[in-house]
Image (tube, grey):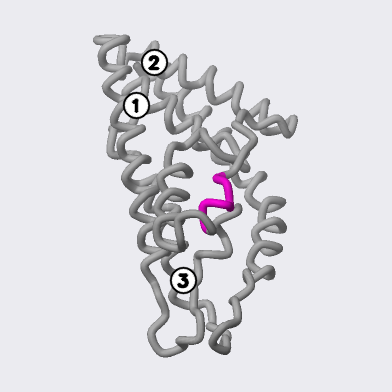
């Protein structure tokens, strides 16, 4: 969550014209790589699985995979690459380019921390042909729309010229507290998708 502090406009002595480009670029980067990853996984699935995609066997495979993800999350061992985009990018490349890099990195789905396995489950379903490639767009919007809304509604603190605007730590603390809520939500969604996969496999 190193990019949380740049979600609000980075105001340096100018409260009338805040710079909203970092938030826009963060969302754009996330959208670009998320769409590309899901499209690539979909194409890979089409090439590897051929006619088996969207077949009842695919629903069985999905049910098994979702069950494994559910078990992993329940044991608090969500599969992830335990890293975040380096915050030093902000000081090296500036606000806008750093925000773009953060978005591009986070949109790769598996390169940073994840609270649940839902993103992996979505990739699995895309590989099996059970959801379309443009699921990556929906996935990205689930990130980008709240992020942009946050940028628009969070009150701006007046910052005198020459002083830095500290990160809104209450946001970071709120996100950390939300993990306790989001994990059960993720478990419920994984379980529901697993049950649906079993139903579709039996129906096929």
Left or right of 38 on screen, residue 198: right
Of the residues under marks 1 and 3, which one precedes in the sequence?
A: 1
Where residue 166 sits in the image (x, y, percent)?
63, 73
Mark identifier at residue 151: 3
Report helix, strand or loop for mark 3: helix
Task: Give above or below for 46 relative to 110.
Answer: above
Q: Residue 80 or 124: which is nearer the viewer?
A: 80
Crowding near pointer 3: few (<14 within 10 Å), some, many (20+)? Answer: some
Q: Residue 101 or 170: which is nearer the viewer?
A: 101
For the residues labelled 1 and 2, the Cα–Cα distance comes to 8 Å
Is residue 86 shown in magenta? yes
Please identify the quadrant where the C terminus is shown. Answer: top left
Tell me if label 1 and label 2 are in contact, CB under 8 Å. yes
Q: Residue 178 or 189: which is nearer the viewer?
A: 178
Residue identified by numbered label 1:
130
Task: Give above or below for 76 relative to 140.
Answer: above
Q: Look at the image and give the residue range highlighted in magenta.
A: 85-90
Report helix, strand or loop for mark 2: helix
Residue occupying the far right of the picture: 75
Residue identified by numbered label 2:
58
Report helix, strand or loop for mark 1: loop
Q: Residue 183 or 150: which is nearer the viewer?
A: 150
Where residue 91 sits in the image (x, y, percent)?
54, 58
Of the residues under marks 3 and 2, which one precedes in the sequence?
A: 2
The image quarter containing residue 155 is bottom right
* Residue drawn at point x = 49 percent, y = 69 percent: 150
Where residue 112 sits in the image (x, y, percent)?
56, 39
Where residue 162 sits in the image (x, y, percent)?
56, 83
Left or right of 86 on screen, residue 145: left
For the residues labelled 1 and 3, the Cα–Cα distance comes to 34 Å
* Residue drawn at point x = 32 percent, y = 23 percent: 129
């Amino acid at each position: 969550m190193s990019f949380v502090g740049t979600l609000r406009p980075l105001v340096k002595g100018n409260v009338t014209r805040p710079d909203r480009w970092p938030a826009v670029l963060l969302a754009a980067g996330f959208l670009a790589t998320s769409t590309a990853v899901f499209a690539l996984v979909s194409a890979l699935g089409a090439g590897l699985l051929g006619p088996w995609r969207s077949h009842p066997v695919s629903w069985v495979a999905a049910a098994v995979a979702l069950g494994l993800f559910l078990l992993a999350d329940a044991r608090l061992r969500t599969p992830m690459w335990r890293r975040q985009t380096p915050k030093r990018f902000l000081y090296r490349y500036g606000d806008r380019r750093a925000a773009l890099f953060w978005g591009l990195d986070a949109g790769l789905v598996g390169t940073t921390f994840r609270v649940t396995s839902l993103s992996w489950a979505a990739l699995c379903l895309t590989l099996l042909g059970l959801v379309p490639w443009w699921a990556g767009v929906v996935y990205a919007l689930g990130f980008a729309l709240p992020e942009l809304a946050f940028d628009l509604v969070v009150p701006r603190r007046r910052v005198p010229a020459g002083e830095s605007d500290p990160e809104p730590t209450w946001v970071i603390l709120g996100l950390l507290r939300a993990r306790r809520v989001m994990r059960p939500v993720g478990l419920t969604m994984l379980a529901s998708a697993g049950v649906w996969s079993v139903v579709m496999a039996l129906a096929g």
